[in-house]
Image (spheres, rainbow, N blue to C red):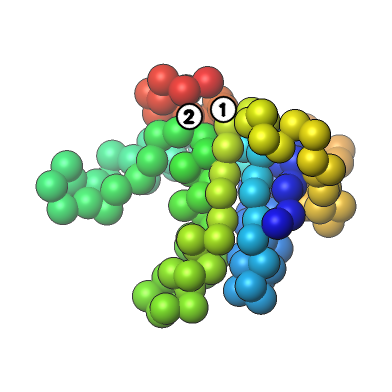
């Protein structure tokens, strides 16, 4: 099992790398999901995620999450072949947490160097997006 500390990682880059590793059979745990970064202008990013959330219907969907950990999990799901057995099994091997749970405190955490944010001026964290969507988990 691989534990990845997602602080200051770009969401899309991290998601694509994780999706590939999940398809190879790895079990992955992401901690500090609220500190993941989305690149772009703050207002346009928040409007994009608000539009995604409002698109759904309470009864028929599509259902889009409010919490930061579930937004990241949904992002990775979009990069997996969701409608195949191998894609669903890969998705089940992914766990995402806000903060660092007690069982992963002592464990060594990996950083994905190709997904780390460097020199960005316009970005929004997933905790800001989750707060904008009305999440009660901070």
**Residue drawn 48% across the image and 29% down it:** 130
Point 55% across, 25% down: residue: 128
Q: Residue at point 51% right, 50% down?
A: 73
- Per the image, label 2 sits on a secondary structure element best described as helix
Question: Relative to residue 128, is residue 12 depicted above or below?
Answer: below
Q: Residue 132, how many percent across, how many down? A: 45, 24
Residue 127, which numbered label? 1
Q: CA distance from mark 2 to mark 1?
A: 5 Å
Q: Secondary structure at mark 1?
A: helix
Query: Which numbered disc covers residue 130?
Result: 2
Where's the N terminus, which quadrant? bottom right
Q: Is residue 23 left or right of residue 84?
A: right
Graded by Cα atoms within 10 Å as few (under 14), some (14 to 19) or many (20 or more), the crowding at tag 1 reads many
Residue 37: tell me if it is visible. no
Circle 2 packing at 10 Å, graded few (<14), some (14-19), many (20+), is: many
Residue 12 in picture, x, y percent from top left: 64, 54
Q: How many marks?
A: 2
Residue found 35% across the figure and 45% down from its top: 64
Q: Residues at badges 2 and 1 in contact (C-beta under 8 Å)?
A: yes
């Amino acid at each position: 099992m691989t534990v990845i500390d997602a602080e200051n990682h770009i969401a899309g880059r991290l998601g694509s790398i994780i999706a590939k590793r999940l398809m190879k059979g790895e079990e992955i745990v992401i901690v500090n999901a609220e500190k993941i970064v989305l690149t772009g202008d703050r207002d346009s990013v928040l409007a994009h995620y608000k539009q995604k959330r409002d698109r759904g219907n309470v009864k028929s969907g599509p259902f889009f999450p409010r919490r930061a950990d579930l937004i990241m999990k949904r992002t990775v799901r979009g990069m997996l072949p969701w409608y195949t057995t191998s894609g669903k099994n890969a998705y089940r091997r992914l766990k995402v947490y806000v903060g660092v749970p007690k069982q992963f405190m002592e464990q060594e955490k990996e950083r994905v160097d190709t997904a780390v944010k460097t020199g960005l001026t316009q970005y929004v964290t997933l905790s800001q997006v989750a707060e904008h969507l009305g999440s009660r988990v901070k």
